[in-house]
Image (tube, rainbow, N blue to C red):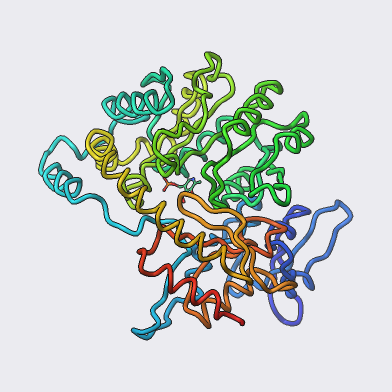
Amino acid sequence: MHFKENGRRWCRLTVYKGAGMLRRRAGQEEDETLRQKTVKSPDERLHVAHPNPITTSQKPATNPWLAAVEPSPIGETKRWVLGRTFPADRPLIDLSQAVPGYPPALELRRHLGELLLDPAVHGYTPILGLPSLRKDYASHLSSFYGAAITAGEVGITSGCNQAFCLALMSLAKAGDQVILPRPHYFNHDMWMRMQGVEPVSLDFRPGSGAVPHPDDAAKLIGPRTRAIVLITPNNPTGAVYPRDTIHAFYELARRHGIALVLDETYKDFLPEEARPHELFSDPDWRETLVHLYSFSKVFALTGYRVGGVTAGTSLMAEIEKAMDCVSICPPRLAQEAALYGLRHLLPWARRNTEGLKARADLLGNGLGRSNRWRLVSIGAYFAYVEHPFSGQRSTDVARRMADEENLLAIPGDMFGAGQERFVRLAFANVTDDKIPIVLERLERFGA
Ligand SMILES: Cc1ncc(COP(=O)(O)O)c(C=O)c1O
């Protein structure tokens, strides 16, 4: 609807009540211009007036659920340093995005180079992936978890993010609720909100090492709850959830007839032979468990977009429909890369894991000696630390740290409300020699 005011043409957009809250990140001030132009109508919706320089009648209205979601935290953090140049003696150290600090194995790159010449590897594959990859991935999971998982129970996706999106779409509809431990992986929270699914936050107890408690989750389950999401080893905290905790969450989900969505993107970064849980040994796991995985980190293939979802075959049939619509099939060459990795590169991956463990120890020990920064938890790719500036928001702290110390990290604020005291350090991104410099910069910052 259009109207004129102060000689300008405006259009009236309708934003459902509560969207203004979603648009704001925890504790941030509401956009002043938005607030001034917001009038509550008797039907309890919010009407937001917008300047309309050209003609809005041709502009498609955006999906209010999507419009209410914050921009990507990765994009936003990277923008803090965009266009800046850094002196050679104080280069930018980027601990923001979780990416392996090394390239894929040379033999994998050579293999893919040769494959490119094969005319048969450029077309679509079946919707849920190459049969050979599904078979090998199912046997990989079977041996990792000591269980019998079949090729029909795994699907290959365009990365683990897509695996989550498809799984959530298959489990919950708009208006449903899903329990999400906080701090959350922001893309999980964003996708739920985009779908109109309500994330119900589950906070960890102080002193728990950032591990959520199943008793706290039990209190959040209601008639609209469809699933609980767990990530272990965790992003953003690095916390590795104890086996008993994972089992207790599984039991809770099973008792209530809801799903446990378990994202184990970082499972390969656990100590060798440490089986994180025995859930796949339950003959009824297919009724409760939905397992997610990524080939991005283990084989350093973040740009290829290849991951996996494991579930009972009836849920898999729903996932297949959604997959067909969003990407027809996962990228062909990426599947070839994952297949080669599973067949040839697990020892290579293990060596990288050992390197990362040594780096985590270096960082963890250094943080343990600090009188200013407090280590909350550390593992796999991440350390979650409490910053020393009480009363200051982590977004402001992290931004100043980028400006003054050329050290980029994601503030706790971006992982949910109540995380203003924390900062995530994605230490996998850098080489070992950078860790002492990171520690030095942290100590000097604001001292
Ligand atoms: C917990 C978790 N799940 C999923 C993903 C996305 O993985 P992929 O690159 O396979 O989409 C990430 C990436 O950082 C992650 O940390």
Q: Position of residue 366 (x, y in %)?
A: 51, 66
Image coordinates for residue 102, horizontal then vertical, percent: 30, 57
In which image quadrant can residue 329 be found?
top left
Q: Quadrant of the C terminus?
A: bottom right
Q: Residue at left 70%, top 47%? A: 204
Q: Is residue 332 visible?
A: no
Foreground: 309 or 70?
A: 309
**Residue 264's spot in the image, x, y percent?**
48, 39
Quarter of the picture containing the N terminus is bottom right
Q: Is residue 386 left or right of residue 276?
A: right
Q: Nearer the viewer, residue 257 or 401?
A: 401
Between 166 and 377, the residue placed more toward the observer is 377
Relative to 442, residue 336 above or below:
above
From where the camera sits, is residue 258 visible?
yes
Q: Residue at horizontal 61%, vertical 28%? A: 247
- Residue 51 place in picture, x, y as percent: 67, 73
Up/down of 124 relative to 83, above or below: above
Please tell me how many numbered marks the rendered image carries: 0
User: Residue at the location (35% across, 64% down)?
Assistant: 431
Given the current orientation, which residue lies at the most extreme top position?
A: 283
Q: Is residue 145 above or below residue 387?
A: above
Residue at the spot 45% in from the left edge and 44% down from the top edge: 266
